[in-house]
Image: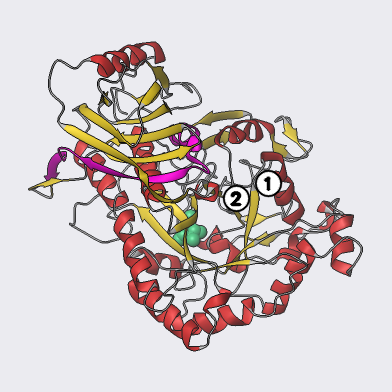
């Protein structure tokens, strides 16, 4: 079965984990151990700016799916779990640390089955509806009935907006194109954005506790319209898109409409949609074009079957470590390929890419609780995957305007896992916290060279990209982030900064001896970053050893 088909039909490691202290010692000796010569090199070209790194690249995704909303974000006001107006307090506190710029909601596939009216008005009177994912055929065993399969609508538009306000993120709302009309969409916009006291829907919003408009700017026009979002052809979707995005009431806010873009490398979807929109002179209605890319197939090319190709989140051989990172590294060519196809019609590149679903996707079995559909554990492999993907977005800051990792909590590549009052941050959370320093910085060009790690792929020798890097400048502070995917070899690297010299340098390192290391409710701090000392630069060039299987952030103050 292919992913497209799945979406359509769905309409341990014996880890010797190091303590933070031990890791600091490794990192420290790495940083100064320069007796052998460097095998890798990173040049940072300060005078070659790429573009501002939109904070929105560091965005999140929360769908009504399994344990994301119910049990993850929303615990209810009467819960014994500490909460702020029903929203889990531990999540609010932790997510602020990654500076969450934007949250996409309510799906995902769920969005094209959601009636926003079910989620407004007094909570005690809201209807209970069958959740889209109820029949997706992916549930783990023995799942009791609850809001995850019969949505109680306790978390609706006002609750989502409050969550965004509490964490300091902007909302990105996905409209239902498959099963509601354009009028329903306009009215949702009216509910959210019409000024206080002007319309009946503004009054309804005020009765829900929010007199002032939410000022939602980002609107997704459906989701995966090639699959669960309607199974449209690109031309059919272009017609639906125009119906939804033309003449939407603005209320003084210029809407940023985001089209349901391709599944990974489907260039035909992009080409035909853009061609039809261009024919109808409607390219100006598109702000962003959403690309989805999941890293799931670890079969090494043996199968493309959506179920058989997946591996386990925790128990994986080293070849699957490399294979998954190879899948993730396709992001670079996906961005450049779709960008180039978009330019066939959008010559000025007014439309930017929005990678609003990305991350790892494993087979079921490591979810922390049985209602967490698509829930999975997250190891150092996911941390390296996140670091390498975010480096890719930073390097293409001129093309990628927004992105959201799938998904925030209790789901695919999550930053958090929670069940009742238990809550833990994953290695991916630490990467987002380390990389937050890039937000709003000027991305500058880098050139990286060095050995490629090798492994056995389906019986044949294979290699993947070695170090991946990105650099950004904010005033006189240079932030450089680097992932080393080599599971066993450190990389002694010369780092040359062209255009300035370094005054002081700080390093933060996320690394573990065991590539399977992960955090759990019982061991919440197995994987966490440590500060590491860095030797002073010699003659303008810094030499640094990137630990095996690591994510590193260097913060360099320039003279
Ligand atoms: O993130 C899980 C699902 O993956 C989303 O609902 C859908 O858009 C994608 O196929």
Q: Quadrant of the C terminus?
A: top left
Residue 173: give x, y in percent of width and height.
Answer: 63, 60
Of pointers 1 and 2, the one earlier in the residue sequence: 2
Q: Is residue 318 above or below residue 33?
A: below
Which residue is the site of mark 2? Answer: 103
Highlighted magenta segment, given as a residue range: 428-456
Residue 37: give x, y in percent of width and height.
Answer: 13, 23
Q: Is residue 503 above or below residue 142?
A: above
Nearest the camera: 521 or 530?
530
Q: Is residue 554 left or right of residue 146?
A: left
Q: Residue at x 13, y 40 (%)?
A: 454
Q: Measure how far apart labels 1 and 2 are at the Cα level.
A: 7 Å
Q: Residue furthest right?
A: 197
Residues marked 1 and 2 touching at CB (< 8 Å)? yes
Q: Residue furthest left?
A: 460
Q: Quadrant of the N terminus?
A: bottom left
Which residue is the site of mark 1? Answer: 164
Mark 1 crowd level (few <14, some 14–19, many ≥20, 10 Å Cα): many
């Amino acid at each position: 079965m292919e992913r497209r088909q799945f979406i359509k039909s769905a309409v341990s490691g014996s880890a010797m984990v190091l303590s933070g202290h031990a890791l600091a010692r490794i990192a420290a000796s790495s940083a100064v151990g320069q007796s052998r010569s460097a095998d890798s090199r990173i040049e940072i070209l300060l005078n070659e700016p790429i573009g501002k790194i939109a904070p929105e690249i560091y965005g999140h995704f929360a769908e009504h799916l399994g344990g994301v909303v119910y049990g993850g974000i929303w615990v209810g006001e009467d819960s014994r779990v500490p909460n702020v107006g029903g929203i889990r307090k531990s999540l609010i506190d932790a997510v602020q640390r990654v500076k969450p710029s934007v949250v996409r909601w309510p799906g995902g596939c769920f969005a094209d089955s959601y009636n926003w009216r079910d989620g407004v008005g007094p909570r005690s009177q809201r209807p209970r509806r069958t959740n889209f994912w109820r029949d997706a055929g992916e549930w783990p065993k023995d799942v009791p009935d609850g809001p995850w399969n019969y949505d109680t609508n306790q978390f609706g538009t006002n609750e989502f907006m409050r969550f965004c306000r509490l964490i300091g993120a902007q909302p990105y709302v996905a409209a239902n194109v498959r099963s509601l009309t354009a009028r329903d969409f306009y009215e949702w916009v009216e509910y959210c954005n019409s000024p206080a006291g002007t319309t009946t829907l503004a009054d309804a919003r005020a009765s829900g506790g929010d007199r002032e408009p939410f000022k939602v700017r980002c609107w997704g026009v459906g989701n995966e319209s090639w699959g669960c979002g309607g199974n449209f052809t690109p031309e059919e979707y272009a017609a639906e898109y125009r119906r939804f995005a033309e003449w939407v009431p603005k209320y003084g806010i210029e809407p940023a409409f985001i089209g349901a873009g391709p599944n990974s490398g489907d260039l035909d979807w992009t080409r035909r949609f853009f061609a039809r929109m261009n024919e109808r002179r409607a390219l100006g209605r598109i702000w962003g074009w959403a690309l989805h890319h999941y890293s799931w197939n670890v079969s090494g090319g043996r199968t493309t079957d959506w179920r058989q190709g997946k591996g386990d989140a925790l128990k994986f051989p080293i070849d699957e470590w490399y294979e998954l990172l190879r899948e993730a590294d396709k992001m670079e060519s996906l961005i450049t390929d779709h960008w180039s196809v978009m330019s066939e019609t959008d010559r000025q590149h007014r439309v930017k890419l929005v990678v609003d679903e990305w991350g790892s996707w494993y087979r079921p079995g490591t979810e922390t609780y049985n209602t967490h559909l698509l829930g999975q554990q997250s190891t150092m492999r996911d941390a390296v995957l996140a670091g390498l993907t975010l480096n890719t977005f930073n390097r293409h800051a001129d093309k990628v305007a927004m992105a959201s990792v799938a998904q925030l909590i209790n789901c695919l590549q999550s930053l958090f896992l929670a069940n009742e009052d238990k809550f833990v941050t994953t290695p991916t959370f630490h990467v987002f916290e380390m990389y937050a320093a890039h937000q709003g910085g000027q991305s500058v060009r880098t050139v990286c060279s060095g050995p490629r790690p090798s492994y056995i792929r389906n019986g044949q020798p294979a290699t993947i990209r070695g170090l991946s890097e990105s650099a950004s400048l904010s005033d006189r502070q240079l932030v450089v982030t680097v992932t080393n995917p080599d599971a066993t070899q450190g990389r002694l690297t010369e780092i040359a900064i062209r255009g300035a010299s370094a005054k002081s340098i700080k390093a933060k390192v996320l690394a573990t001896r065991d590539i399977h290391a992960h955090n759990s409710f019982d061991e919440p701090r197995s994987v966490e970053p440590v500060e590491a000392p860095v030797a002073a630069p010699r003659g303008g060039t810094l030499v640094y050893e990137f630990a095996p299987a690591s994510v590193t952030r260097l913060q360099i103050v320039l003279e």
